Image (spheres, grey):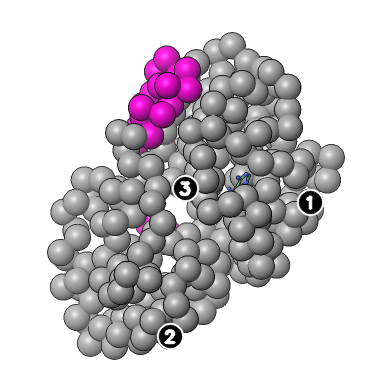
Amino acid sequence: MSVRRASTDFDAIAASYDESRRANPALAATLGQLFEGRDGPLLDLGCGTGNYGREMGTLGHEVVGVDASPGMLGQAVRKLGAGQLVLGDAQGLPFGVGAFSGVFSVLVLHHVPNWQLALDESVRVLGAGGRLVVFYGTQEQYMNLWLWEYLLDGPDALPSRRPGLEESIKGLRSAGFARVETQPFSYTTPEDAALFVGAHAPELYLDPNVQRGIRVFRNIEPSRLEAGFERLRRDVESGAVTNVMARHQESATVRGDCTFFVADL
Ligand SMILES: C[S@@+](CC[C@H](N)C(=O)[O-])C[C@H]1O[C@@H](n2cnc3c(N)ncnc32)[C@H](O)[C@@H]1O
């Protein structure tokens, strides 16, 4: 997907984004711990409407947000302040060498066409000893979502390819990070209704607000999407969805819904 396409897609959902997407407390707490005691400015890479940047700001960090979508940045102004926000592409960051002591990026990397370039750019803008924390669902986690049993019944509905676990670690190492650790994360509360939030609470996927805030649904042909949600609605009502969920339970528990990648220079 081109940057223009990503930007347009997010511009289209920017105004309503925060209706279903607020900072997830457990995710924000982990992010806070991972940067605890680290001085210097942090870059919120793909800051969106500023939900996690604001959380890090309340912990005392100076946060600069960058995003490719003017619409999302427009929503972030009241949370981070216009002076802290920059329109830019993760693949060519508009900042100098070593400008930040840390970079964090929540649910962004899989939207970036050349994610390796985004990792390389993160290294360039990080100072010595800098840390990058990237959070997203890997290809394995993504494909294990039971939701696809309802929505993926045709080739036109195939979801986009995203980096896998090993591929991401390899990409971080080749960008120059000396130490890379991973931490699985599972959604247990609904504040940030990302694609994975309904993994354990299927009724969330039936909420039109939640559906509107999840960009990948826009890739699926509308009548197919509607038919899939209708089947899910029937299975939620009858309880049959629990059998579908059970088929994915074991690997979901092992793998988590998403992954924190913690990379140090
Ligand atoms: C799902 S939102 C996440 C926003 C925010 N990090 C959060 O978790 O609340 C993904 C964001 O990535 C941004 N994005 C996508 N591709 C980008 C790129 N190439 N460079 C910078 N931002 C990008 C989108 O505009 C969007 O705001």
Disc nearest the viewer among 1 and 3: 3
Q: Is residue 186 left or right of residue 46?
A: left
Q: Residue at x 54, y 45 (%)?
A: 112
Find disc 2 in the rendering and name its residue. Answer: 223
Magenta segment range?
Answer: 168-189
Q: Residue 15 at what x, y percent from top left?
A: 70, 67
Q: Secondary structure at mark 3?
A: helix
Tell me which label, 3 or 2, sits earlier in the chain.
3
The amino acid type, in three-letter code, at marker 1 is Val
Vertical relation: 7 (above or below) 119? below
Q: Position of residue 94 (x, y in %)?
A: 73, 32
Can residue 252 be seen by looking at this rendering?
yes
Q: Is mark 2 within 8 Å of ligand 1?
A: no
Q: CA distance from mark 3 to mark 2?
A: 25 Å
Q: Is residue 243 left or right of residue 225?
A: left
In this rendering, the label closer to the viewer, 2 or 1: 2
Specify which label sits upstream in the sequence, 1 or 3. 1
Q: Circle 1 is placed at which residue position?
A: 77
Cβ of mark 1 under 8 Å from ligand 1: the answer is no
Q: Residue at x 60, y 56 (%)?
A: 6
Q: Residue furthest top?
A: 128
Q: Is residue 35 in sight in this rendering? A: no
Q: Position of residue 213 (x, y in %)?
A: 55, 67
94 or 104, nearer to the observer: 94
- The residue that label 3 is drawn on is 110
Residue at 19% x, 51% y: name it.
251
* Amino acid type shown at disc 3: His
Work out how far the residue at label 1 is from the one at label 3, CA to CA, in angstroms: 24 Å
Q: Secondary structure beneath disc 1?
A: helix
